[in-house]
Image (cartoon, rainbow, N blue to C red):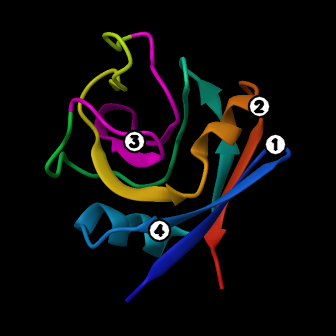
Amino acid sequence: MERRIRIKAGAVEVAAELNSTGTAQAIWDALPISGRGNRWGEEIYFSIPVNLEAENAQEVVATGDLGYWPPGTAFCIFFGPTPMSRGEEIRPASPVNVFGKVVGDATVLKQVASGAEITIDRKS
């Protein structure tokens, strides 16, 4: 089953597809979710009402990856290097469960300021 979501971050909107992991299913079941986004380098993250353990957690991710960060129960969107990155790699603060990917150009999220309202819902 294809599971697509819409992410509205301030004035920016992107679509994403969830993968077939348990993390993706738990987040899908919790939608819609909203909160205030925080910026950490070229990552947006915010706490969500989902509490999960690590699931094939990755130390390095790719542009557009959606990650769940277990220590902060956070939804993360990666679109470039973070303060932990070495060179051009994208490195979260600690390993994340990658559960989906932005469809199209994730770098448009560079326009989103810290504190912006983030809304995530199912895309029909």
Q: What residue is shown with label 1?
A: 10
Q: Are marks 2 and 1 in contact (CB under 8 Å)?
A: yes
Q: Which residue, given by chain and number where applicable, does mark 4 sit on?
A: 17
Q: Report the Cα–Cα distance between label 1 and label 4.
A: 20 Å
Residue 29, percent from left and from top: 45, 75
Tell me where residue 53 appears, x and y as whole percent. 20, 48
Cα distance between the residues tagged 1 and 3: 21 Å
Q: Which mark is residue 111?
A: 2
Mark 3 crowd level (few <14, some 14–19, many ≥20, 10 Å Cα): some
Residue 39: x and y in percent read 61, 23
Residue 37 horizontal side relative to residue 84, left or right: right
Q: Amino acid at mark 1?
A: Gly
In space, the residues marked 4 and 3 are separated at their CA atoms by 20 Å
Q: Give the mark nearer the N terminus: 2 vs 4.
A: 4
For badge 2, the amino acid type reads Gln
Q: Is residue 65 visible?
A: yes
Which quarter shows the C terminus?
Answer: bottom right
Q: Amino acid at mark 3?
A: Thr
Magenta range is 59-83
Q: What is the CA distance from the residue labelled 2 to the residue labelled 4?
A: 21 Å
Residue at disc 2, secondary structure: helix
Element class at badge 1: loop
